[in-house]
């Protein structure tokens, strides 16, 4: 299969390389694209260097599948042209997620929706993916009605620049130097703040709105109510979320634990004796969403409280995209052309 990665030098793009290799994705040729700044750089794949190129003007990436993660405006401008040249584009940006003609897919929740694509498939927002890996099986078992979510989001969610900022400002703070944020508006060193996305008239920021709208689309629940508070925290990698979810009827923590333990993509981490629950350090570099702190929500009958942590560069982005491609291959819907 001819594979192209657009945004190959970024936080998500570089993750694709390792994931395609680890999962033995059937790559016959790999093309790496980034901005003009990175043209000529070499990245390693299966022990060999691959040269990063600038995007071609004609839109032909000579690929069967394109994993795109170079920002929404680039994807909005070019993804249809990549698809017209025969590629299936699996897009990590926000450009196409709410387009009614584009499936928005978390394989554990709605993998088969991907089969209805018309050339572009959208990967959801990272916080949405991590929440839904846990909420989808609970919804199937108990019928989800409403949720409140508080997120604790890693700086790498803002790309390589977010990672650099946490490292540089932490060092500056420890050295007693002035704190001069570049990527974020406020210092992320020894601090946290409301998510760095624009705020609408209703007071919700863009990230909070994505959690609501994308969850409705993925779960096929147009009336689902979700109220989120999204917060950036000084963690390099892996987003955590406190979720309070209300179901159609009473749900015990034990019944929920059983459902979650049997669900794909989840590792239950719920050790009350050792006070050990999902943590971003434990989720980092792994494929599973960690789920724990399971308890009945005492504030509302029929509601559960839980805490999740997931590597948002892997499951929240690159891994989810590769799993979508694997699902298409398994269903015979993505094949390399016969030479
Ligand atoms: N980070 C996450 O956890 C995460 C999770 C889910 C979705 N996403 C989405 O994935 C996308 C990439 O995020 P990221 O975190 O990987 O960002 P990043 O680390 O800033 O990387 C951005 C990538 O896009 C490339 N790029 C920028 N402008 C370009 C242009 N004009 N032409 C071609 N390539 C260009 C960059 O190339 P250069 O290196 O040459 O500048 C780099 O490879 C974003 O849309 C983001 O919202 C990110």
Image: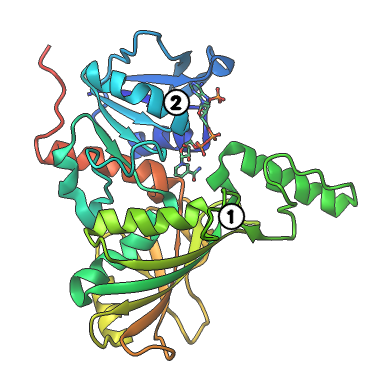
Do tag 2 and tag 1 residues touch (Cβ < 8 Å)? no
The answer to whether the residue bearing label 2 lies less than 8 angstroms from the nearest atom of ligand 1 is yes
34 left or right of 189 in image? left
At x 88%, y 50%, the residue is 175
The correct choice, above or below, for 59 with respect to 272 in the image is above
Residue drawn 14% across the image and 27% down it = 335
Q: Camera-side residue: 209 or 130?
A: 209
Question: Which of disc 1 and disc 2 is earlier in sequence?
Answer: 2
Q: Looking at this rendering, what residue extends furthest in the front direction?
A: 201
Q: Position of residue 270 (x, y in %)?
A: 42, 78
Q: Residue at x 45, y 38 (%)?
A: 15
**229 relative to 91, above or below:** below
Residue depicted at x 45% and y 33%: 72
The chosen color scheme is: rainbow
Q: Which residue is mark 1?
A: 195
Q: Which mark is residue 270?
A: none
| Horizontal side, residue 66 vs residue 153: left or right | left
- Asked whether mark 1 lies closer than 8 Å to ligand 1, one says no
* Disc 2 packing (10 Å; few <14; some 14–19; many ≥20): some
Place of residue 139 in the rendered image (x, y in percent of width and height, measured from the top left):
24, 70
- On the image, the x and y values in percent for residue 235 come to 61, 56
Quarter in which the C terminus is drawn: top left
Q: What percent of the width, then of the height, locates residue 337?
A: 13, 18
Residue 339 to residue 120: above or below: above
Q: State how far apart marks 2 and 1 are (Cα).
A: 23 Å
Q: Is residue 61 left or right of residue 172?
A: left
> Tag 1's secondary structure?
loop
Query: Does residue 24 sit above or below 170 in this rendering?
Result: above
Q: Label 1 neighbourhood size at 10 Å, few (<14), some (14-19), many (20+)?
A: many
Q: Secondary structure at mark 2?
A: helix
> Which residue bears the numbered disc 2?
74
Quarter of the picture containing the N terminus is: top left
């Amino acid at each position: 299969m001819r594979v192209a990665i657009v945004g190959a030098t970024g936080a998500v793009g570089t993750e694709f390389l390792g994931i395609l290799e680890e999962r033995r994705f059937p790559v016959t040729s790999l093309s790496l694209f980034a901005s003009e700044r990175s043209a000529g750089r070499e990245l390693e794949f299966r022990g060999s260097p691959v040269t990063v190129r600038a995007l071609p003007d004609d839109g032909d990436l000579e690929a069967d599948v394109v994993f795109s993660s170079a920002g929404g405006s680039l994807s909005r401008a070019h993804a249809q042209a990549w698809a017209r040249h025969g590629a299936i584009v699996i897009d990590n940006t926000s450009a196409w997620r709410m387009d009614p003609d584009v499936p928005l897919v978390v394989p554990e929740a709605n993998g088969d929706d991907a089969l209805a694509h018309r050339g572009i498939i959208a990967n959801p927002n990272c916080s949405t993916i991590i929440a839904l890996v846990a909420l989808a099986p609970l919804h199937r078992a108990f019928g989800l009605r409403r949720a409140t979510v508080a997120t604790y989001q890693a700086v790498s969610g803002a790309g390589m620049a977010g990672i650099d900022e946490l490292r540089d400002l932490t060092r500056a703070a420890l050295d007693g130097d002035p704190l001069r944020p570049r990527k974020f508006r406020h210092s992320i060193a020894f601090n946290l703040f409301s998510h760095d996305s624009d705020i609408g008239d209703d007071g919700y920021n863009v990230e909070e709105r994505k959690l609501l709208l994308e969850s409705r689309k993925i779960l096929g629940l147009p009336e689902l109510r979700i109220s989120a508070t999204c917060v950036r925290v000084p963690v390099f990698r892996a987003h955590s979320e406190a979720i309070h979810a209300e179901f159609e009827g009473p749900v015990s923590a034990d019944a929920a634990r059983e459902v979650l333990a049997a669900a794909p993509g989840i590792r239950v981490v719920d050790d009350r004796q050792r006070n050990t629950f999902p943590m971003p350090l434990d989720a980092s570099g792994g494929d599973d969403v960690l789920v724990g702190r399971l308890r009945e929500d005492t504030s509302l009958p029929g509601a559960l409280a839980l805490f999740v942590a997931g590597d948002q560069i892997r499951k929240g982005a690159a891994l989810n995209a590769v799993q979508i491609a694997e699902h298409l291959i398994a269903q015979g819907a993505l094949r390399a052309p016969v030479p």
